[in-house]
Amino acid sequence: MNDLLSPTPKSDYDASSIQVLEDMEHVRLRPGMYIGGKDDRALHHMVAEIVDNSMDEAVAGHATWIEVELHENGHVSVRDNGRGIPIDPHPKDPSKTALEIIFCTLNAGGKFSGDSYQTSGGLHGVGSSVVNALSDHLSVEVARNRELYRMEFSRGLPQGPLEKVGAAPNRRGTSVTFHPDPEIFGSLSLKPARLFKMARSKAYLFSGVEIRWKTAIADGETPQEATFKFPGGLADYLGETLAGATTYAERPFAGTVEFADKYGVPGKVEWAINWTPARDGFIQSYCNTVPTPEGGTHEAGFWAAILKGIKAYGELANNRKAAQITREDLVSGGCALVSCFIREPEFVGQTKDRLATVDAQRMIEGAVRDHFDNWLAADTKSAGAILDFLVLRAEERLRRRQEKETARKTATKKLRLPGKLVDCTSNARDGTELFIVEGDSAGGSAKMGRDRKTQALLPLRGKILNVLGAASSKLGSNQEINDLTQALGAGLGTKFNLDDLRYDKIIIMTDADVDGAHIASLLMTFFFTQMRPMIDAGHLYLACPPLYRLTQGAKRVYCLDEAERDAWLEKGLGGKGKIDVSRFKGLGEMDAKDLKETTMDPATRKLIRVTIDEDEPGQTSDLVERLMGKKPELRFQYISENARFVEELDV
């Protein structure tokens, strides 16, 4: 067993032991580092990377239309009438054209210096090359200088030199056609509905571009051809989204403002927002036309402007209750779209889910605030209706909080679980966290490393019941499930009430091994089948404990997996002496300091929010039933179909 867990290293550790992967090899080995994984979302993100390149040409004023076409054979083409990718030899490597460098080399592109693009969505220099590496076929055609050129690739490698196809006197721009590699994505395929939605949203985000859509794959819902161009931009988008719904403002608060950053570089923000009782609120944000589903600094700046503006208006209207309004109240019924264009944005990760540019918050807040103040003053009828609505939301929120305080005290008295539930001292739900930990030993370290005010613990002994694989009669008699249900205080199944949930975040914290993953799967199955509204509302999370701790002198880093460990070992920690590598066999082996720093402290930890992303109703339910249900033959079939995509694990 010890040999399996800690393989004996080669005795002759020398230079030949060090592997150097070429760019394309590394992308294919670790696609998750570049596009987030091998799932359906990552597959469609590849198309977004190529479309974003064409959008950058349009935003820069060099292209007026973009065409997205899904072919019957699963290939997808993205065309534009921009300047065309440069095809001349690259100055640093004259043996290769600029086109080959762009598609075969990471961190290569025309968007780093700012000379070719004032703003762009592709600043990492990896989009085109990653798509190329993960495609079994990719073809690029460039119409430039009245000539047409073509180059073919497969799995990141050129299949021949750049060819001059012939004259193209009436054509210009770039056309990229590719097919996602089945070796990476298996049986997954591009879906017309998802690509159609993406293409349409790009047209809303930049009113000067025309988006053309074509598909040869019929799904019964998506049109086979369409053309999008929306002069009203986000205001049109919001109007279509809220069509037929009653709103508190007759016309949305919408606008576009140009601004300059601290270096004098121009930027722009466009927004549209309205409030409605007809649906839950939402915000969709974008930076340089790239969706940012996890928000970021531009969202923070926008909401800060709206919150300060509505409070100031409430003060002018002598409504003292306006001071109670928080961002939570704004979002609860506010339907908002925010799009900014800034130079050299900083995103979190290559998939660009969250904007991290610090100055964006200040710039966007300043750009929106004055316009919102003027809009409220000019339309007092809408302003009054919105203010009344938000005050009611604030009062309702405070009432629920008061009820939660009473419910928490009552539920704690009822539970009486010494050695099990270790509750936090806060009486309010906001900001509290329940860690579901694996075993009492892990619970001991977690208890010492937690924040007593906001963090509660519930240790589970072993694996909980598989609620799909067991008889329904066993659900009520299982002690672990009863303890968990009572601690959360919100009921089960049809009796589940999200308002009764006693904690803001429910965090599954298990060992970073196969058993820990199994326990997490069982818990997620339980929550999905019995408490799904909790997942839909964004309350369920997975903790990310590290597998390794590297120490070199006074320097110490934690690594989530082998890839991160190897990267640090390659570049060093910056300390003195030999690097000591420690592998955590489980959470119980980590001391309180390690556990707090890596897994529990909100300032330094990493969490994964559990979400349900399905394009077709019931898709996730079918998959959960297939993997966790009572029919082993369905699990066997799934494993047989997907086993070849599983990477080797270091366990």
Image (tube, rainbow, N blue to C red):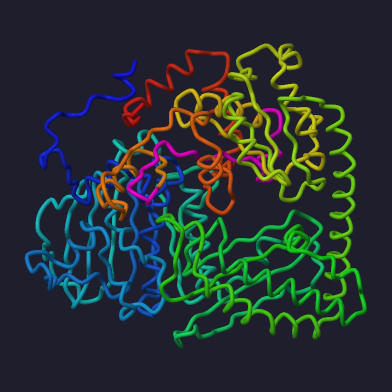
* Horizontal arrangement in the rendering, residue 178 relative to residue 340 (left or right): left
Between residue 541 and residue 117, name the one nearer to us: 541
Answer yes or no: is residue 73 visible.
no
Q: Which quarter of the picture shows residue 181?
A: top left
Q: Residue furthest bottom?
A: 264
Provide the residue span drawn in magenta: 529-556
Identify which residue, 314 or 212, lies in the foreground.
Answer: 314
What residue appears at the point 40 percent right and 46 percent down from the top-left corner? 43
Image quarter where the N terminus lies is: top left
Q: Is residue 198 above or below residue 218?
A: below
Q: Is residue 76 above or below residue 308?
A: above
**Is residue 642 rendered to the left or right of residue 569?**
right
Residue 553 in magenta stretch: yes
Residue 573 visible, this angle: yes
Q: Nearer the viewer, residue 538 or 384?
A: 538
Q: Quadrant of residue 418?
A: top right
Q: Using the rendered view, name the quadrant where residue 122 is placed.
A: bottom left
Q: Position of residue 497 (x, y in %)?
A: 80, 37
For the C terminus, the quadrant is: top left
Measuring from the top left, give residue 96's x and y in whole percent: 11, 64
Image coords of residue 319 (percent x, y):
92, 74
Q: Position of residue 459 (x, y in %)?
A: 65, 27
Please give left or right for residue 155 compared with residue 55 in the image: left
Asked if residue 382 lies in the magenta stretch, the reply is: no
Q: Residue at x 52, y 79 (%)?
A: 268
